[in-house]
Image (cartoon, rainbow, N blue to C red):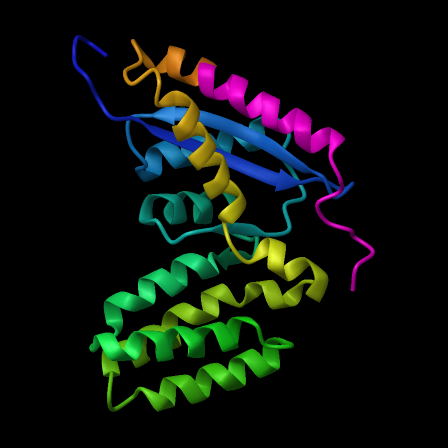
């Protein structure tokens, strides 16, 4: 762009409709993932008719979070459990503790219900209070953001607790755009990515139901 090669960010939103099928809600190519770009993207979804959102699932990227609070402030937020597991590593003081900490967090995430998850979290926070105080503090503040999904039916939680679906889309986009290497402008990049997502969206439309809303 303007005679220079620049990195670009691809912003994607997917959702599950009332019939339980996945849909690509929107895609945009921006020069960054700053709040202003995420906010414009999310506001665009609303302007095109997106309503009745019951849950937002994402990582904790600062730009995205600020935009989410501005546009969907009243909607419950589920912080991606996979990213939380990854983030925990930065607070584990010793390498030999990593597997144990990961197992403790996994036990919280796979609890039978929110009460059990909260109980396990409290025990885990106390467990590391002396041996890993930074980890203990982080667990107490961050992990509850990954427990919102317990308000939903047990059969839905595995599919709602992470952003793995979007990550798979990102991986497919990277694979299929790698052959181009450099796009002449944002519009050409968006055209190819939109075509890829339209193809995937058609597969979702004709495939099996993603969520069964009669699940309990």
Q: Main secondary structure of the magenta part?
A: helix
Q: Quadrant of residue 19?
A: top right
Q: For the N terminus, which image quadrant? A: top left
Q: Magenta segment range?
A: 192-216
Q: For the C terminus, which image quadrant? A: bottom right
Q: Position of residue 5 (x, y in %)?
A: 19, 17
The answer to whether one can see residue 153 in this image is no
Q: Is residue 47 left or right of residue 41?
A: right
Q: Residue at x 43, y 79 (%)?
A: 104
Q: Is residue 10 left or right of residue 91?
A: right
63, 215: nearer the viewer: 215
* Residue farthest to the right, as pictured: 214
Tell whether position 15 is magenta: no
Q: Quadrant of residue 127?
A: bottom left
Is residue 76 placed above or below 102 in the rendered structure? above
Q: Is residue 146 left or right of residue 98?
A: right
Q: Residue at x 37, y 90 (%)?
A: 126
Q: Residue at x 24, y 83 (%)?
A: 133
180, 34: nearer the viewer: 180
Is residue 185 placed above or below 167 in the rendered structure? above
Q: Position of residue 125 (x, y in %)?
A: 38, 84
Is residue 146 placed above or below 118 in the rendered structure? above
Q: Residue at x 45, y 49 (%)?
A: 69
Q: Position of residue 208 (x, y in %)?
A: 75, 40
Q: Quadrant of residue 76?
A: bottom right
The answer to whether one can see residue 161 in this image is yes
Q: Position of residue 14 (x, y in %)?
A: 57, 37
Tell whether position 194 is magenta: yes
* Residue farthest to the left, as pictured: 4
């Amino acid at each position: 762009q303007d005679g220079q090669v620049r990195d670009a960010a691809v912003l994607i939103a997917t959702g599950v409709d009332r019939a339980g099928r996945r849909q690509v809600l929107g895609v945009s190519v921006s020069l960054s993932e700053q709040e202003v770009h995420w906010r414009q993207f999310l506001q665009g979804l609303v302007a095109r008719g997106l309503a009745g959102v019951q849950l937002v699932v994402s990582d904790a990227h600062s730009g995205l979070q600020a935009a989410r609070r501005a546009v969907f402030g009243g909607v419950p937020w589920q912080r991606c459990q996979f990213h939380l597991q990854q983030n925990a590593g930065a607070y584990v003081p010793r390498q030999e503790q990593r597997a144990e900490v990961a197992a403790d967090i996994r036990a919280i995430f796979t609890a039978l219900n929110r009460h059990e998850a909260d109980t396990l979290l409290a025990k885990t926070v106390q467990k590391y209070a002396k041996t890993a105080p930074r980890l203990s503090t982080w667990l107490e503040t961050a992990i509850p953001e990954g427990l919102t999904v317990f308000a939903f039916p047990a059969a839905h939680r595995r599919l709602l607790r992470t952003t793995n679906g979007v990550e798979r889309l990102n991986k497919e986009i990277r694979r299929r755009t790698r052959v181009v290497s450099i796009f002449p402008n944002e519009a050409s990049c968006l055209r190819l990515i939109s075509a890829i997502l339209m193809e995937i969206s058609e597969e979702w439309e004709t495939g099996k139901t993603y969520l069964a809303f009669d699940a309990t």
